[in-house]
Every structure is written in structure tokens, then in C-alpha cells.
């Protein structure tokens, strides 16, 4: 019995199609397909290979539809990036948010709406790649005027499957164009930035039926009955936070993957000037919750360093480096500001880190193991800073940290996080995003009931959680 749904979860480095089987108080995940997501640099910048992602998504669904009771499909991905369309056709290849084309566009937007006012409307932290800035860059390139529709990537893929164009609200909240108080497109911002409302699709909430997969595509997938596509928290972080297995009221989360999203859940946006200055964001979550958080640069620093070392020596592997890093005395390595803008674009991360440390008179790592330790140490310190700030900004104490996503498997990072934040860390699940995606679909299909808390309890019951405690003597 129970229900099976397919969660398409696209991350910045890999994608997967997961089958989630939900039966009352149990949820089980299985992988139907896993595939790399490899951005492509062309003369006009860094792009997502959206056709390849769609092809892989369809190949994964072809596996998924073999499940006789498959009830629906939901799609999530990283935020902010989009395709421009005209008459339903994609115009050009969507850019990667790490592309540097927004450098001038930020100033152009701020000339029309200054940062303080922008925040008052959209409650979003300033990230140079927020959709609002990317659109300004596309306008300068003469592309925006050709388009009659902007679809964020999960919405684009859902459109390709169903033929229906929607804007899922959690992801739309990362564009910088939603009014954070109403959760609707901000008429005032659109007006002042001269963006036509018709460029943006109507909003839908997680749990809504987007449409069924078109019959020709369904037939191609091998499905002979309707296959519904359900809106989920299509911003991956929204889905991940929905699956944080917290039982406590006073928890904070670190959704730890390419980025580390560090924050809490609140009922109403926090729009203080202090919060803006500290670069805290109010992103819309599943069930009307608000994710009050900060983007910390995340495991990107590590994976990009590893990729750099592997270019020179393909035999370099992460596990031995992590073991080496665990043996490095804490005061041997420097600590750098993980949020420095120089770390955003792809490239030679170790040299950039070295330069930062040099400029700030900090010890330079001598070995790769020391580099890894330096990165993890710096991340843990950044988490500690963000937790302290979130307590001050919300006035609510944080008693426990839940680390979810790929980073929850990194023992050293979890240990350092417990040490540096002085808080117990509960690590897991690794596949929080897929679980959040699955549970929202299962609830829409009537297979589970209830509040965000009951979905969290379900995750808790089905996950092997690891616990880390701050100690005064721990090796970290
Ligand atoms: C994490 C994430 C994050 C955004 C970034 C673009 O995958 O969605 O929440 O800020 O990617």
C-alpha cells in the first residue's frame, strides 16, 4: 500500500530522480537515476546544459514510471536561474548564476531602487546573481526585449513536461521581485524596474497540481495513463528545510551542499536594517513559512579546490585528504572569510584562498590536507557567526543545529561545527531535498496528512541521525 512519487532534484553538480514510497508513518527513498550536471562555458559566458538536464530527467522518469503506483512527479533545483521564452520557445541557453555578467547590472538596478528600498520590498539578501540583476544584464545584452516570458528552471522543465507555465512561489521568492509581505509579484518593483507583469507566470504553491505530462511525452516515457506534475518547494533549499528532522522549537538548520544555507524558520519576515546589513534573507518556504537565513559559500570551496588539484593529478581523492585534515592542529591553519566575492566564480580556489590569507597575515596551508582543514575550519567559523547573528536578529535562542544535505556526511565538518558554534549538531538526512520534495507530493496525493511538524516527525522516524556534541577536549 502507500504511494510512490518521483522527486526530480537538480543540484549544481549532479541531478537525481528519486522514488519516494510513503506509507503512513514511513518514507523510503530509492534512486531511479543519478547524473552529472556539467555547466558549459561558451563565448557568451557560463551556462547550464538545460537540454541535457531535461534529457536525463526524462531518462530517469522512464525508469520511474515502471512503478505501477507512481502517483506524481515534482521538480526542484537551485534557485534564481531562468530561461527566457518567446511564444513558448526557449531563447538562448540559460546562464549559470556563477557567470559574471551581472557585475554592471547590479549598479543599474540600484540606481533605480536602492538596496535599502529593495530589501524593504523583497526582504532578500544581496547576492549579485539574484534574478533581478540577471534580468538587468539580459536587458543590457538586448535579450530581455525579445522575451515574453521568464521561467525559473524547475518551472521551465515542468512546462516542457506539461505545457503549462507557472511560477512556483518558493523559488519565485528568490528572484527579488516578490513582495515578501504578500508573497505576490511586487507591482511596484516591476513597475519601477520596467518589467512587464506578463513576463512572469501566475504563482502556484507547493502541493498544487501543475498539470499532467502531455500525452505524447507520456507515451514516450512508457506511461499509458495520466502522470500528474505537482508543484513542490521547487527551490531546493525550501524542500530541504521542509525535511529538517527537528523536534525542538529552537532549532537552526544548515542546509549543507554546494552552498551552506544557515538560518531559522520564522512566521513573519524580519525586515530590520540590521538584518539587511548582515545580509540575512527572507525566502518563502513550504506552507507559508519563512526561511530567515544567510548564504555561506559552502562545500563549493572544497569541491572546487579538489577539482583544481585533480586537474594536475587525477589520483587526488577527498577521503584521504579529510583524514589528513582531521589530524591538523587547529591553530596551524588560518581562517578566511568564506563569503569574499572572489570565491564565487569557478577557478583556482587554493590560490585565491592563499591570496586572501596572505593579505590578512594568516598562516598559509602547506599541504592539501591543511588546505582542507583551513576550508572546513573557515566554514565552521562562518556558521558560528551566522548562528550568533540570527539569535540577535530574531531575539530567539538557538539550542540545536540540524545539518542536512551532502555536508551532513562530512564528519570533520560536523565536529568542527559543534565545536565552533558551541551547540549540539544533529546530522542527516543527506537527501533532505528529495525527501521534502517527496513529502509535499505525498501530502498532495493524500498519502500523508498534516502540518510541517508532522512531516518532520516522519523524516525523523526514518533517518539514521548522527549526533555531535561540543566538548572542551575534542580533537576539533
Ligand atoms: C542552493 C541554492 C541556494 C541559492 C543558490 C543559488 O542550491 O538554491 O539556496 O541561493 O542555490
Image (spheres, rainbow, N blue to C red):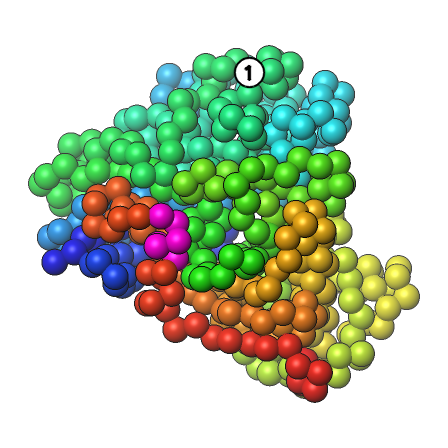
Q: Is residue 109 above or below residue 265?
A: above
Residue located at (36% from left, 42% from top): 232
Q: Looking at the rendering, in which quadrant would you find the N terminus? A: bottom left
- Tell me where residue 230 appears, x and y as whole percent: 29, 38
Q: Looking at the rendering, in which quadrant would you find the C terminus? A: bottom right
* Position of residue 340 in the picture relative to residue 148 (left or right): right
Task: Find the magenta span and give its range.
Answer: 451-456
Label 1 secondary element: helix
Quarter occupied by residue 107:
top right
Residue located at (37% from left, 69% from top): 463
Q: Is residue 303 above or below residue 44?
A: below
Mark 1 closeness class: few <14, some 14–19, many ≥20 residues within 10 Å:
some
- Residue at image mark 1: 187
Quarter occupied by residue 419:
bottom right
* Position of residue 476 in the picture relative to residue 299 (left or right): right
Residue located at (71% from left, 83% from top): 472
- Tell me where residue 273 appears, x and y as whole percent: 75, 36
- Tell me where residue 15 appears, x and y as whole percent: 40, 53
Q: Is residue 188 magenta?
A: no
* Position of residue 64 in the picture relative to residue 332 (left or right): left
Residue located at (13% from left, 43% from top): 223
Viewer-closest of 178 and 182: 182
Amino acid at each position: 500500500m502507500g504511494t510512490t512519487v518521483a522527486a526530480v532534484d537538480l543540484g549544481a553538480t549532479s541531478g537525481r530522480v528519486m522514488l519516494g514510497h510513503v506509507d503512513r508513518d514511513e518514507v523510503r527513498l530509492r534512486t531511479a537515476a543519478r547524473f552529472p550536471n556539467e555547466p558549459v562555458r561558451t563565448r557568451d559566458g557560463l551556462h547550464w546544459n538545460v537540454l541535457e538536464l531535461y534529457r536525463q530527467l526524462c531518462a530517469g522518469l522512464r525508469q520511474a514510471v515502471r512503478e505501477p503506483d507512481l502517483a506524481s512527479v515534482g521538480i526542484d533545483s537551485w534557485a534564481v536561474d531562468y530561461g527566457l521564452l518567446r511564444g513558448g520557445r526557449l531563447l538562448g541557453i540559460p546562464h549559470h548564476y556563477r557567470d559574471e555578467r551581472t557585475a554592471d547590472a547590479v549598479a543599474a538596478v540600484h540606481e533605480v531602487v536602492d538596496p535599502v528600498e529593495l530589501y524593504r520590498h523583497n526582504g532578500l539578501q544581496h547576492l549579485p546573481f539574484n534574478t533581478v540583476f540577471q534580468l538587468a544584464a539580459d536587458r543590457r545584452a538586448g535579450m530581455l526585449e525579445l522575451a515574453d516570458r521568464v521561467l525559473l528552471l524547475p518551472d521551465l522543465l515542468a512546462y516542457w513536461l506539461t505545457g503549462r507555465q507557472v511560477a512556483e512561489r518558493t523559488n519565485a521568492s528568490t528572484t527579488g521581485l516578490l513582495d515578501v509581505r504578500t508573497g505576490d509579484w511586487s507591482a511596484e518593483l516591476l513597475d519601477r524596474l520596467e518589467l512587464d507583469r506578463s513576463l512572469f507566470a501566475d504563482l502556484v504553491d507547493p502541493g498544487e497540481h501543475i498539470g499532467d505530462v502531455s500525452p505524447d511525452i507520456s507515451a514516450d516515457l512508457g506511461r499509458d495513463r495520466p502522470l500528474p506534475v505537482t508543484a513542490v518547494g521547487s527551490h531546493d533549499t525550501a524542500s530541504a528545510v521542509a525535511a529538517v528532522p527537528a523536534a525542538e522549537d529552537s532549532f537552526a538548520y544548515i542546509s549543507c551542499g554546494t552552498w551552506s544555507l544557515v538560518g531559522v524558520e520564522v512566521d513573519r519576515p524580519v525586515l530590520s536594517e540590521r538584518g539587511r546589513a548582515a545580509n540575512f534573507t527572507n525566502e518563502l518556504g513550504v506552507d507559508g513559512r519563512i526561511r530567515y537565513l544567510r548564504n555561506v559559500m559552502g562545500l563549493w570551496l572544497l569541491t572546487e579546490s579538489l577539482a583544481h588539484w585533480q586537474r594536475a593529478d587525477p589520483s587526488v581523492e577527498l577521503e584521504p585528504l579529510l583524514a589528513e585534515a582531521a589530524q591538523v592542529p587547529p591553530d596551524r591553519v588560518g581562517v578566511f572569510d568564506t563569503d569574499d566575492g572572489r570565491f564565487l566564480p569557478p577557478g583556482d580556489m587554493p590560490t585565491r584562498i592563499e591570496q586572501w590569507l596572505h593579505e590578512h597575515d594568516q598562516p598559509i596551508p602547506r599541504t592539501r590536507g591543511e588546505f582542507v582543514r583551513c576550508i572546513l575550519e573557515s566554514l565552521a567559523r562562518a556558521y558560528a557567526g551566522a548562528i550568533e547573528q540570527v539569535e540577535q536578529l530574531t531575539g530567539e535562542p538557538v539550542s540545536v543545529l540540524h545539518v542536512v544535505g551532502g555536508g551532513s556526511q562530512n564528519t570533520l565538518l560536523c565536529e568542527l561545527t559543534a565545536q565552533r558554534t558551541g551547540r549540539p549538531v544533529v546530522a542527516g538526512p543527506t537527501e533532505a531535498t528529495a525527501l521534502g520534495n517527496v513529502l509535499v507530493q505525498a501530502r498532495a496525493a493524500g498519502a500523508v496528512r498534516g502540518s510541517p511538524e508532522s512531516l518532520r516527525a516522519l523524516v525523523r522516524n526514518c533517518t539514521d541521525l548522527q549526533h555531535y556534541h561540543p566538548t572542551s577536549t575534542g580533537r576539533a
